[in-house]
């Protein structure tokens, strides 16, 4: 029989799509007020990996990522996703989102993202929220799964999450 083990705290991260640069700056401020200061914010790049969000958010969407300073409990990711949904709702025009916030977390082994969309590889967390392992860590770097979205497969994105993982590893050492 297995025994239950305590899960180490995790590094909270967000992947964000914003309709424009001003909105991106506003969202950063809102998320920092909600979840604390950041350890890192990636550069903003054009989201040209797919046209999926163009009808809702328009053209010229920006993609960026954030990592937060305070470690959190992994089991809180469902609540955090519901909070991000409320923030998104506050930034709708005629029922169309102007921002998409995908919270998740980094462990030493993986990047997990929370979502409202079900799929064969996603695990139901409750209250309409699912989680997926989006990247896995092996031999010194993160790798994508077959289902990983194209923007999370990008070399610069993987390098960014490798950097956040190293920050997380150092934070874990100071917690122990």
Image: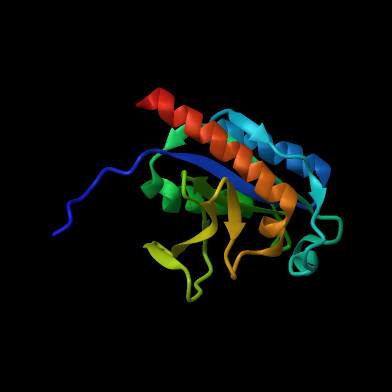
Left or right, 15 with reference to 72: right
Give the residue furthest to the front: 139
> Residue placed at 53% from the left, 51% from the top?
137
Q: Inspect this view and state whether residue 165 appears.
A: yes
Give the residue furthest to the right: 60
Please name whichever residue, 27 or 69, is drawn nearer the observer in this view of the structure. Answer: 69
Please name whichever residue, 27 or 113, is drawn nearer the observer in this view of the structure. Answer: 113
How many marks do you count on the picture?
Answer: 0
Residue 32 x %, y %? 60, 32
Left or right, 69 with reference to 58: left
Q: Inspect this view and state whether residue 34 appears.
A: no
Give the residue furthest to the bottom: 120
Q: Quadrant of the N terminus?
A: bottom left
> Residue placed at 48% from the left, 71% from the top?
121
Q: In which quadrant of the rendered view does residue 31 lie?
A: top right
Q: Quadrant of the C terminus?
A: top left
Residue 116 x %, y %? 52, 64
Left or right, 68 with reference to 151: left
Q: In which quadrant of the rendered view does residue 25 lie?
A: top right
Q: In which quadrant of the rendered view does residue 49 lie?
A: bottom right
Residue 90 x %, y %? 63, 50
> Residue placed at 48% from the left, 47% from the top?
80
> Residue placed at 48% from the left, 34% from the top?
169
Please name whichever residue, 37 or 111, is drawn nearer the observer in this view of the structure. Answer: 111
Give the residue furthest to the top: 174
Residue 29 x %, y %? 66, 33
């Amino acid at each position: 029989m297995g025994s239950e083990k305590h899960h180490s705290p995790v590094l909270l991260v967000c992947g964000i799509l914003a309709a424009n640069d001003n909105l991106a700056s506003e969202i950063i401020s809102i998320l920092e007020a909600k979840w604390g200061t950041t350890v890192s914010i990636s550069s903003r790049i054009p989201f040209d990996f797919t046209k999926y969000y163009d009808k809702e958010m328009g053209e010229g969407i920006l993609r960026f990522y954030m990592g937060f300073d305070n470690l959190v409990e992994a089991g809180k990711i469902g609540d955090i996703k519901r909070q991000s949904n409320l923030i998104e709702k506050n930034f709708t025009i005629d029922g169309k989102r102007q921002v998409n916030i995908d919270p998740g977390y980094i462990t030493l082994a993986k990047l997990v993202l929370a979502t409202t969309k079900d799929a064969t590889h996603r695990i139901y967390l409750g209250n309409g929220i699912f989680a997926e392992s989006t990247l896995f860590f092996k031999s010194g770097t993160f790798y994508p799964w077959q289902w990983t979205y194209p923007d999370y497969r990008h070399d610069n994105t993987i390098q960014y999450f490798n950097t956040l993982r190293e920050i997380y590893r150092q934070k874990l050492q100071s917690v122990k």
